[in-house]
Image (cartoon, rainbow, N blue to C red):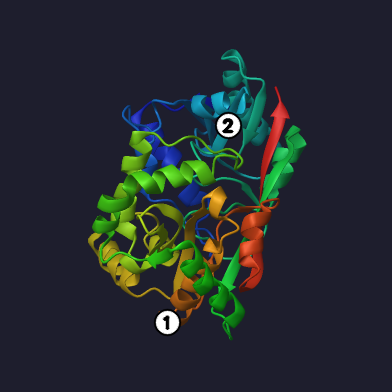
């Protein structure tokens, strides 16, 4: 006998956050989110609360033991942008039991329908800066911190509920090139001269933020505007992102392409991989965690591709080639074993074409599901 509990008390918030850690105990591929970050989503001043409505549920058995959890999100800005009436589900975790899964999904669907929504979609978070998609290939691959691991039976639970594929994302490992593409390097140098462009990496992260913050977020909004599920940046989202940049990024992880009058026309951000450190401490920030975190940040052997974008009017002007040559240098000269790409839509030919410039290995596929309610 199972029942649904809406999460409201501090005790249930702790149970909501802890359930995932307990469920994946001993799984060597799972990478938890930081506990402190997960608890922030329950605060009234959470960064997305001005554009979202949320609800949280636990499923418990007859002994009041948690057997599943889920969050529902009505992303008002996304629904307005895409002219949809969708309720998102995220942070879906459950034991291998169809009744439990159905109760959790029904709870979010009912909540969304009561507020005028007509589709259930997910896993999708507050924005595309959050973990999203259900892992359906790559269960034997270590996850990046930015993405979510799940057991293989989750797909069966969702499909048995009636959810169907909406989109898929792909992930790759990118390796340092054995030989650089001299033609591409020459072409990028020609593009710099012809269009009076230059590649720039700042001396400090704070200097980059001070000089290019507004342009950076503007180009993200433009280049990611038509990407599935994206939402416009708010001031709160920008401030939150900047806080994360200051903590995680190093100057050498930032590259922008500038015109002669310092207009940003392309950019790339990578991050030192946090997966092993966060997994080691089960998402808890302790003094020892911070020591290992900053040690790993200083000299990582794995990096994650964070964000990359080129203004549409510069896509045929060699800017991508300039960014590729930057990656060549970054991968070859900094002791990097490989770079993880994170999510790329399977029909995003621009980014997939960009990745064809590298030696790569397909690692994972994730899926977003949808159902009429």
Question: Residue 102 or 300: which is nearer the viewer?
Answer: 300
Question: Residue 290 or 367: which is nearer the viewer?
Answer: 367
Q: Residues within 10 Å of mark 1 (few under 14, many from 20)?
A: few
Does residue 195 sit above or below 53 in this rendering? below
Q: Are marks 1 and 2 in contact (CB under 8 Å)?
A: no
In this picture, residue 70 sits left or right of residue 201: right
Q: Tag 2's secondary structure?
A: strand
Question: Residue 10 or 241: which is nearer the viewer?
Answer: 241
Residue 220 visible within the image: yes
Nearer to us: label 1 or label 2:
1
**What residue sits 35% from the left and 66% below the top?**
201
**Image x and y of residue 313, in percent:** 55, 50
Residue 170 visible within the image: no
The image's mark for residue 88 is: 2
The image's mark for residue 333 is: 1
**Image x and y of residue 118, in percent:** 67, 20
Residue at the farthest bottom position? 179
In this picture, residue 139 sits left or right of residue 197: right
**What residue sits 25% from the left and 51% below the top?**
210
């Amino acid at each position: 006998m199972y029942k649904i509990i809406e999460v409201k008390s501090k005790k249930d918030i702790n149970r909501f956050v802890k359930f995932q850690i307990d469920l994946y105990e001993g799984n060597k591929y799972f990478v938890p989110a930081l506990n402190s970050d997960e608890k922030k989503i329950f605060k009234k001043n959470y960064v997305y609360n001005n554009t979202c409505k949320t609800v949280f549920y636990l499923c418990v058995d007859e002994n009041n033991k948690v057997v599943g959890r889920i969050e529902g999100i009505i992303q008002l800005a996304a629904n307005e942008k895409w002219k949809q009436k969708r309720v998102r589900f995220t942070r879906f975790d459950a034991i291998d039991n169809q009744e439990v899964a159905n109760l959790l999904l029904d709870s979010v669907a009912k909540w969304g329908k009561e507020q005028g929504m007509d589709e259930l979609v997910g896993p999708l978070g507050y924005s595309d800066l959050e973990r999203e998609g259900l892992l359906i290939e790559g269960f034997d691959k270590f996850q990046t911190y930015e993405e979510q691991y799940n057991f293989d039976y989750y797909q069966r639970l969702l499909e048995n509920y009636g959810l169907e594929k909406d989109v898929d994302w792909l992930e790759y490992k990118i390796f340092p090139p054995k030989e650089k593409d001299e033609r591409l390097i020459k072409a990028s140098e020609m593009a710099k001269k012809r269009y009076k462009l230059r590649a720039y990496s700042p001396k400090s992260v704070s200097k980059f933020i001070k000089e290019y913050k507004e342009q950076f977020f503007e180009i993200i909004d433009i280049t990611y505007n038509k990407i599935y599920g994206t939402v416009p940046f708010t001031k709160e989202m920008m401030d939150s992102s900047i806080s994360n940049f200051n903590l995680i990024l190093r100057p050498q992880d930032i590259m922008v392409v500038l015109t002669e009058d310092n207009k940003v026309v392309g950019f790339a951000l990578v991050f030192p991989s946090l997966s092993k450190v966060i997994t080691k401490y089960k998402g808890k920030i302790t003094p020892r965690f911070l020591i290992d975190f900053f040690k790993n940040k200083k000299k990582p052997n794995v990096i994650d591709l964070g964000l990359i974008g080129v203004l549409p009017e510069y896509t045929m002007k060699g800017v991508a080639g300039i960014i590729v040559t930057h990656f060549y240098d970054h991968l070859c000269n900094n002791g990097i074993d490989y770079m993880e790409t994170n999510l790329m839509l399977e029909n995003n030919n621009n980014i997939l074409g960009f990745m064809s410039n590298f030696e790569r290995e397909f690692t994972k596929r994730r899926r977003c599901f949808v159902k009429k309610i």
